[in-house]
Image: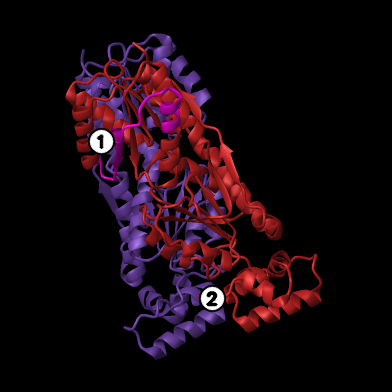
Chain colours: A red, B purple
Amino acid sequence: MSQITIVDLAEKLGLSKSTVSRAFRDSSDISSKTKERILAKAEELGFSPNLYASSLRGNRSQTIAIIIPEFGNKFFSQAIKGIELVARSKKYHTLIYVTDNSVQNEASIVRSLVNGRVDGVLISASGEGKDHSHLQTLLDHGIPTVFFDRSYDDFQGHFVTGNDFESSRLATQHLIDNGCKKIAYLVINQNVSIGKIRMDGYRKALEDNDLPFDERLILDTENDEIKNRAAIQRLLKQHKPDGIFASVERLAISTIRVAGQEGIQIPQDLKLICFSCLDIADLLNPSLSVVKQPAFAMGKEAANFLFQALDKPSENLEQPNTTFLESNLIFQASSQLI
Amino acid sequence: MSQITIVDLAEKLGLSKSTVSRAFRDSSDISSKTKERILAKAEELGFSPNLYASSLRGNRSQTIAIIIPEFGNKFFSQAIKGIELVARSKKYHTLIYVTDNSVQNEASIVRSLVNGRVDGVLISASGEGKDHSHLQTLLDHGIPTVFFDRSYDDFQGHFVTGNDFESSRLATQHLIDNGCKKIAYLVINQNVSIGKIRMDGYRKALEDNDLPFDERLILDTENDEIKNRAAIQRLLKQHKPDGIFASVERLAISTIRVAGQEGIQIPQDLKLICFSCLDIADLLNPSLSVVKQPAFAMGKEAANFLFQALDKPSENLEQPNTTFLESNLIFQASSQLI
């Protein structure tokens, strides 16, 4: 893999990054002489021969990749649906990859994509990790990349996500308004961006109401339902929370099952609210209070950003930003004041 | 697109189809002389130049395509999860396409895939239609294709599906055993293979119990929730069924909502069972009786067949078969005898 970046190349040439970028996209607003000079230097330095093959010579792959940490929950299937719809309208092909929440898998997938297989990447971060050099690989190859839902702190680019801090604060405040004084926070990997931000919102609501933050009420779980149910059972028995804010739907579902076994009544003994994209939350027993993310819209928005970047690469690559989409808080029986 | 098929080519050469097929897969068990003769004739007739590019010269795309009629229901996301897992273990890339239940879209997707973009195709049929010549295109290009869940009557190849006739018969019999005498069948497009087969199972159960088949109790709907709810409302008001067998989950969900509005109690006034892959059917109010298809296993099985065909093309292409995977009938409150 080439270690030369577009920045190195621009420096060597004494040109701006955007001018170099334009050459690689065969833009008409730089002179053919400048373009030739850039391409010659790129060839000399061994920069991105595969980009030549795909973009330079106008021979795009017409393919994007979606990389997600897991499959089978409603959030990601809705988001993919939104992405696929946009890609189809652009006559693009869509590759799909699942990292199983492993940053190593993510890196290996990314590295398999840079040889001209895809023109752009949509990614929801697998986890925290420390080595994110695979993101630099994407940049080096001039492949526009947009993150959605989950990102990395050190990623400087387009990111489309929910207004998780505010909706987590509001969800927690709602439990407090309905009488809860001892609210547990359930999360899968509190180090992942969304796990952290949602906890920040939860903490803010506690602070606003002069309620103590108690580490023992934070349940950081794994992707193993059996273990999670056991951990929830211990939490309910040992610490007797009167409210639960779950950062993912499946932890709320596990809570409902455990509460059922333990004879704990929702919402009488325990109030519950969670992030969820379920469209039948109102049909559950009890109907489930949710923070509903606009998953489909998030997929569409991320894809739209990606295609903007593909259409006008020099402009968009230089204006990274984060777009926050509002979630919808739906209060139902599970968090009701009795 | 080439109109010459592998069968034409074999005839012209006076060889068997499997020998020709071996040449195209660069198999070691035919002589290099025969191989050359086959390749020369293929070139002469203009047969499948892209197959040359991808398979012949050992330069596979390492990519498969999944084509599904719709996205966003649990069945297809589970099936894709199974497929993706197998593809990943084989170090294959996975393209995903959605036809929106349109056979025209399906044909156009298939035709975009035959130029070496993919080595194999997994497909769940979009609908009935009359022109399935795109399937012949896949065969002509020697691209192994496996159908899952839904197929076409005229497709002669590998097909992995549920034991839908038997599970539909059993689901209907269960409603009859619990006292239903006037059972409606709800379907989205009764002409699609699964719609037909599930209705056959329903009819068989009626016959077995000397209950009349009444066309007015068949509700053939579209993919429009608002219209479907109105149609279900009319059905419930006009024909007052005492049981409903829904061939897809979303029609059962619409039924629960309409019954709620109309003050019709489930299961007291109306018993309900449906095909569904919901893993929280037991948490609904009332808990929902389901025919649960092994969606994840179906995806895995279909992908395994495809990779067998990719590994040993000559053997597998000539032995088409249908594999039936058993569904799990789970009887809960929604169909209970009160």
- Kindly identify the residue that appears in the image at 37 percent across and 52 percent down: A101
Label 1 CA crowd tier, 10 Å (few <14, some 14–19, many 20+): many
Give percent across and percent down for residue B55. 45, 74
Q: CA distance from mark 1 to mark 2?
A: 56 Å
Q: Is residue B111 left or right of residue A287?
A: right
Quarter holding residue A160:
top right
Q: Dot 1 falls on which chain?
A: B
Furthest toward the top, the residue is B263
Q: Dot 2 falls on which chain?
A: A
A224 shown above or below B17: above
1 and 2 marks on the same chain: no
Report the number of numbered marks: 2
Give percent across and percent down for residue A162. 52, 38
Does the magenta run of residues contain A233?
A: no
Residue denoted by label 1: B167
B316 shown above or below B32: above
Furthest toward the bottom, the residue is B33
- Pick whichever, B183 or B85, lies toward us: B85
- Pick whichever, B119 or A208, lies toward us: A208
- Give the extent of the magenta segment: A202-225
A137 shown above or below A261: below
B167 shown above or below A117: above
Label 2 CA crowd tier, 10 Å (few <14, some 14–19, many 20+): few
The quarter of the image holding the C terminus of chain A is top left
Secondary structure state at the residue bearing disc 1:
helix
Residue denoted by label 2: A2
- Kindly identify the residue that appears in the image at 65 percent across and 78 percent down: A42
Q: Is residue B109 visible?
A: yes
Q: Identify residue type, mark 1.
A: Ser
- Kindly identify the residue that appears in the image at 39 percent across and 55 percent down: A99
